[in-house]
Amino acid sequence: MRIGVLAVQGAFAEHIAVLRKLEAEALPVRLPLELISLDGLIIPGGESTVISRLIRDYDLSDQIKKLAASGLPILGTCAGLIILAKELSDSKMQTLGLMDLVVRRNAFGRQRESFEAELSIPALGEKPFPGVFIRAPRIEQANGNVAVLTRLNDGTIVAARQEKLIATAFHPELTDDLRLHKYFVDIVSNSKPSPGG
Ligand code: GLN
């Protein structure tokens, strides 16, 4: 199983380290060629305006969209969530538009720029997941066939799934809890054609 981590800007090294802990093959991706023969892709946190620009400058946009349309599992965290969203409520920045979400950038204001919250994520089991939020976006609307994976206590949606696409407003790669990545790796391994089949 080969999982690429978009490595144009942001917290890609941390995702690669977590994937390796899970014994998945993890590769940094910067060129369109490096997207070929991946079984999954992670779009990390960072600065979404920069990531968005570099995705276009490096000619990665069309290829990622094509792969997503053919069923490539993708995980986007924080800025990665913004990049996956179809619509931004406060920005004209170009996104990949792959998930039927309306997202607001930097949605928690100055006082709560960074915070941690224990999240109940039923898909990961009973134990709360440590949510690390850094200048995080929030999901204002989850439309179509998007399933909400978790909310903050006040009801704010902070993770969602649309078929094989997962997006989180928080940073699972900055904790020791591997369950969110394991959840993604399982989606990748279940969608990989079985050998000989
Ligand atoms: N605030 C950043 C943005 O809008 C996202 C922050 C993050 O990825 N930690 O791109």
Image: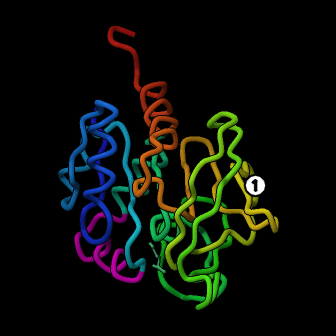
Is residue 146 shown to the viewer in this render? Answer: no
Q: In this view, does 53 lie to the left or right of 108?
A: left
The kind of secondary structure the magenta stretch mainly shows is helix
Q: Nearer the viewer, residue 101 or 123?
A: 123
Q: Tell me where residue 20 appears, x and y as whole percent.
A: 26, 38
Residue at coordinates 40% horizontally, 83% vertically from top-left? Answer: 49
Quadrant of the rendered image containing residue 47: bottom left
Q: Which of 67 and 116 is in front in this view?
A: 116
Is residue 130 shown to the viewer in this render? Answer: yes
Residue at coordinates 24% horizontally, 35% vertically from top-left? Answer: 25
Q: How many labels does the image show?
A: 1
Q: Quadrant of the N terminus?
A: top left
**Mark 1: secondary structure:** loop
- Vertical order, 14 against 8 (above or below): above
Q: In which quarter of the image is the C terminus?
A: top left
Residue at coordinates 43% horizontally, 57% vertically from top-left? Answer: 65
Which stretch is magenta? 49-61
Q: Is residue 45 left or right of residue 105?
A: left
- Vertical order, 186 against 179 (above or below): above
Q: Tell me where residue 29 appears, x and y as whole percent.
A: 22, 55
In the displayed orientation, state which residue is furthest to the right: 154
Q: Tell me where residue 168 appears, x and y as whole percent.
A: 56, 58
Q: Is residue 152 magenta?
A: no
Residue at coordinates 68% horizontally, 72% vertically from top-left? Answer: 102
Disc 1 marks a residue whose amino acid type is Gly
Residue that label 1 marks: 144
Q: In this view, does 194 lie to the left or right of 30?
A: right
Q: Does the magenta stretch include residue 60?
A: yes
Q: Tell me where residue 79 appears, x and y as whole percent.
A: 46, 71
In the displayed orientation, state which residue is furthest to the bottom: 110
